[in-house]
Image: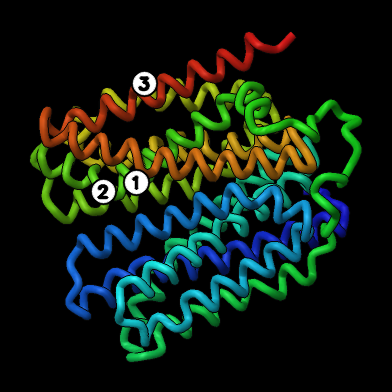
């Protein structure tokens, strides 16, 4: 890809910084669970700590546009990085659950603006002709680095009294990339809206303009969490062995990571809306086949790989859509809404899936996901009809 030097530099440094945080993020979650378990706390305590972290993320998301407007994008991200390090470094020596809750709330509060502003930064510097591929590289890099997190946690857990401190130092490695970036312009004034993009759109106007962005994000958040939590149970309920069933989530993540560049390339060539909707239709067509594919030798793995790629492309192209439609302060708000809808999809749909599977069996998982996928496809049609 032929990119101007300053855009190439910014893309590399910002992607690297966010990817490093992906490693740290992926390590802190299992470290938290293991350390609390070692100290005699049950899964209920771990669940509450996870909920508090998510609440911090919601608050941080809502504060992001204001912080970015007052401090600038880079200063806000650096401040969030410092807060993340300070919030997790002392946890090796903290026993009281209320202090854990405060620390994890601060951690969630720090991470949300960082990811929101990283996504908006990439979207703002990406040329429209290459936006799909650049965003796909960004999301793929973050996904692959996030997978490294649990492997790092396995090594760190043996460092008695220093695991979270070392994890904090990993977060610090993201700072140099931010300092080297050139795109430090005020989000509200960066670039003129000469290409028809909206710069001053409010929260409600963004939701009305591009509902597919929000519904697509909620769908993939639900899909991601359900694949990790319930897909192995679904497979075992249909007679699959435990080892092969547990590998299902990894195959879905592999498809998500490996097929995003292809989706971005197709979006750049044939149009983002067309490819976005096609991915939704493909997911709608594949999900009802899930119970039958369990019994197909090797077909199960290939099926899940493609399904994971199509579902991941719905989220990647939602990010691409936000960069095509908005810029400046409106782009930051759009990225914040994406973060909020991620939290909604990641909490409400898996919770409903667990209850539904208990009442109606494992097949309820398929039809709940299918319903959200159909809602996404419908949202793409609303966007197409709403345009003058």
- Secondary structure found at label 1: helix
- Secondary structure found at label 2: helix
Q: Position of residue 360 (x, y in %)?
A: 12, 28
Q: Report if the CB atoms under discs 2 and 3 are less than 8 Å apart.
A: no
Query: Whole-Å distance between the Cαs marked 1 and 2?
Result: 6 Å
Q: Position of residue 329 (x, y in %)?
A: 76, 42
Q: Which quadrant of the rendered structure holds the C terminus?
A: top right
Please name the residue that numbered disc 2 is placed on. 229
Q: Nearer the viewer, residue 61 or 268?
A: 61
Vertical comparison of 27 with 280: above or below: below
Q: Is residue 351 left or right of residue 148?
A: left
Vertical comparison of 247 with 321: above or below: below
Please name the residue that numbered disc 3 is placed on. 285
Q: Position of residue 242 (x, y in %)?
A: 13, 53
Q: Nearer the viewer, residue 194 or 278?
A: 194
Q: Position of residue 14 (x, y in %)?
A: 70, 61
Quarter-wise, where is residue 271 in the image? top right
């Amino acid at each position: 890809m032929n990119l101007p030097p300053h855009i190439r530099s910014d893309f590399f440094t910002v992607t690297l910084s966010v990817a490093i945080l992906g490693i740290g993020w992926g390590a802190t979650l299992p470290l938290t669970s293991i350390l609390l378990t070692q100290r005699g706390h049950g899964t209920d305590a771990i669940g509450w700590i996870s909920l508090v972290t998510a609440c911090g993320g919601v608050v941080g998301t809502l504060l992001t546009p204001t912080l970015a407007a007052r401090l600038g994008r880079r200063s806000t991200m650096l401040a969030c990085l410092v807060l993340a390090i300070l919030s997790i470094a002392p946890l090796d020596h903290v026993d009281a659950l209320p202090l854990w809750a405060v620390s994890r709330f601060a951690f969630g509060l720090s991470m949300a603006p960082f990811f929101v502003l990283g996504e908006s930064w990439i979207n703002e510097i990406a040329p429209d002709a290459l936006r799909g591929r650049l965003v796909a590289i960004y999301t793929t890099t973050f996904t692959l680095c996030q997978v490294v997190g649990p492997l790092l946690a396995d090594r760190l857990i043996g460092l008695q009294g220093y695991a979270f401190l070392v994890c904090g130092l990993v977060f610090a490695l993201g700072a140099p990339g931010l300092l080297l970036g050139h795109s430090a312009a005020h989000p509200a004034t960066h670039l003129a809206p000469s290409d028809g993009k909206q710069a001053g759109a409010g929260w409600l106007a963004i939701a009305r303009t591009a509902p597919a962005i929000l519904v697509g994000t909620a769908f993939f958040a639900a899909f991601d969490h359900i694949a990790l939590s319930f897909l192995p149970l679904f497979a075992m309920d249909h007679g699959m062995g435990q080892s092969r069933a547990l590998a299902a989530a990894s195959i879905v993540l592999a498809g998500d990571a490996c097929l995003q560049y292809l989706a971005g390339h197709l979006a750049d060539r044939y149009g983002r809306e067309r490819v976005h909707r096609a991915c939704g239709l493909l997911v709608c067509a594949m999900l009802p086949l899930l119970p039958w594919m369990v019994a197909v030798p090797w077909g199960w793995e290939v099926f899940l790989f493609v399904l994971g790629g199509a579902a991941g492309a719905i989220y990647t192209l939602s990010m691409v859509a936000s960069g095509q439609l908005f810029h400046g302060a409106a782009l930051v708000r759009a990225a914040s809404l994406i973060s909020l809808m991620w939290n909604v999809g990641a909490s409400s749909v898996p919770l409903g899936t667990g209850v539904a599977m208990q009442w109606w069996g494992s097949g309820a998982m398929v039809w709940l996901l299918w319903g959200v996928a159909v809602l996404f496809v419908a949202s793409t049609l609303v966007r197409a009809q709403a345009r003058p």
